[in-house]
Amino acid sequence: MSRPSIPADCLPPVPTEESEVRSADGTRLHVEVYGQPGAPTVVLAHGWTCSTRFWAPVIHRLADRYRVVAYDQRGHGRSEVPPSRVRYSTRALAEDLSAVLAGTVPAGERAVLAGHSMGGMTIMAAAGRPGVADRTAAAVLISTGPSDLVAELRVVPGAVRSPGLRRFLHRRILRSRLPLGPIGPVTRAALKYGTMGAGSPVERAEVTARIVHACPTAVRANWALVLDRLDVRAGLARLTVPTAVVVGTDDRLTPPVHAHRMVAALADPQGLLLLPGVGHMAPLERPAEVAAEIDRLAAAHLPGTAAAAAGSAPAAAPATGTASSERTAAA
């Protein structure tokens, strides 16, 4: 049986530049730059078990008017695999982002940061750090959460009602060191159940599987230990730039309860965008709306982008009412 074809917008674009930066502990990070040299900068941080390839549909929608920077989190994609568990931590995530910004955003300039899942946690962990705060104009937190991840997981079916048993099973799933195996109908369907909305096309589930299955098992498990005890609420409180939050209503890994908590804790909330029927992989499932939200923040907070954004046709409706308004994108 042939595997599903890859949607055109999920094919990785060709970067205009590739480089490596070294984090504070010497870990090498792979960095890619797309789009327009000299244009305002958007920096993308991917999530657990993903890579720069995850952002392809969003990059395609932004590269005509922005300089888009994407990097592989440590251990993922083409970045160096840390040699020991002690190099997996929220501090390491923050230091990695700081190194990427120092290497790609010139001093005196600022970028819009967008982070998905662990990438959003990275932004929260790094908030307030010198070298990050002074290079950040605004942020978009996508399908993410600051703490209590295991307690809020929705992967185990609702028929399991015992909170203690649910927490135990979720922790076992999260920390599993079992290899994901070859991609086939069963493994693809299982991954789709946990990470995507039920209505997501099989072609996008295939893209998700190819990205996630490429992550080394040890890397996946070591980051799972960090996520199990994650608490970046202190960093969230230091995130003072204008910040928007995006989440799918059917996200099983970081359900909307996290989004509501983040909006309530933000110093300058710029709205909560709910994507009906969407799971955890919002940038792959609904890239037009995610790109439009990044575009909205960039147009408002990066010099020289308002005119370009005004000429575009974002799929998500602009925020209405107060800055912290909640809105639902059309299905």
Image: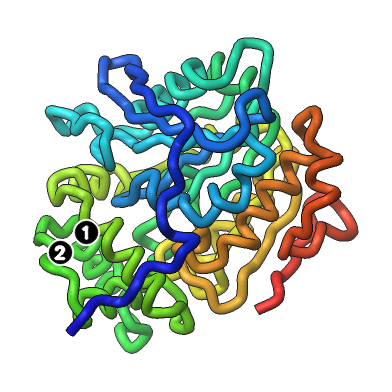
Q: Is residue 139 above or below residue 18?
A: below
The one nearer the camera, 321 or 103, is 103
Q: Which mark is residue 213?
A: 1
Q: Where's residue 192, x and y in %?
A: 34, 74
The residue that appears at 42% across and 70% down in the rendered structure is: 252
What's the CA distance linking mark 2 and mark 1? 6 Å
| Residue highlighted by disc 2 | 180
Q: Where's residue 65, x and y in %?
A: 69, 40
Q: Which mark is residue 314?
A: none
Q: Where's residue 255, x and y in %?
A: 50, 66
Label 2: few (<14), some (14–19) or many (≥20) C-alpha neighbours in 10 Å: some
The residue that appears at 62% across and 46% down in the rendered structure is: 62
The answer to whether marks 2 and 1 mark residues whose Cβ atoms lie closer than 8 Å is yes
Which amino acid is tagged 1?
His
Kindly indicate the quadrant of the structure image that contains residue 189: bottom left
Q: Position of 169 compared to 121: left or right?
A: left
In this view, the residue farthest toward the right is 321
Say what secondary structure mark 2 lies in: loop
Residue 322 visible, this angle: yes
The one nearer the camera, 54 or 9, is 9
The residue that appears at 63% across and 39% down in the rendered structure is: 139
Q: Position of 150 compared to 310: left or right?
A: left
In this view, the residue farthest toward the bottom is 159
The residue that appears at 72% across and 64% down in the rendered structure is: 315
Q: Quadrant of the C terminus?
A: bottom right
Q: Is residue 28 above or below residue 192?
A: above
Which amino acid is tagged 2?
Leu
Label 1: few (<14), some (14–19) or many (≥20) C-alpha neighbours in 10 Å: many
Q: Is residue 272 above or below residue 44?
A: below
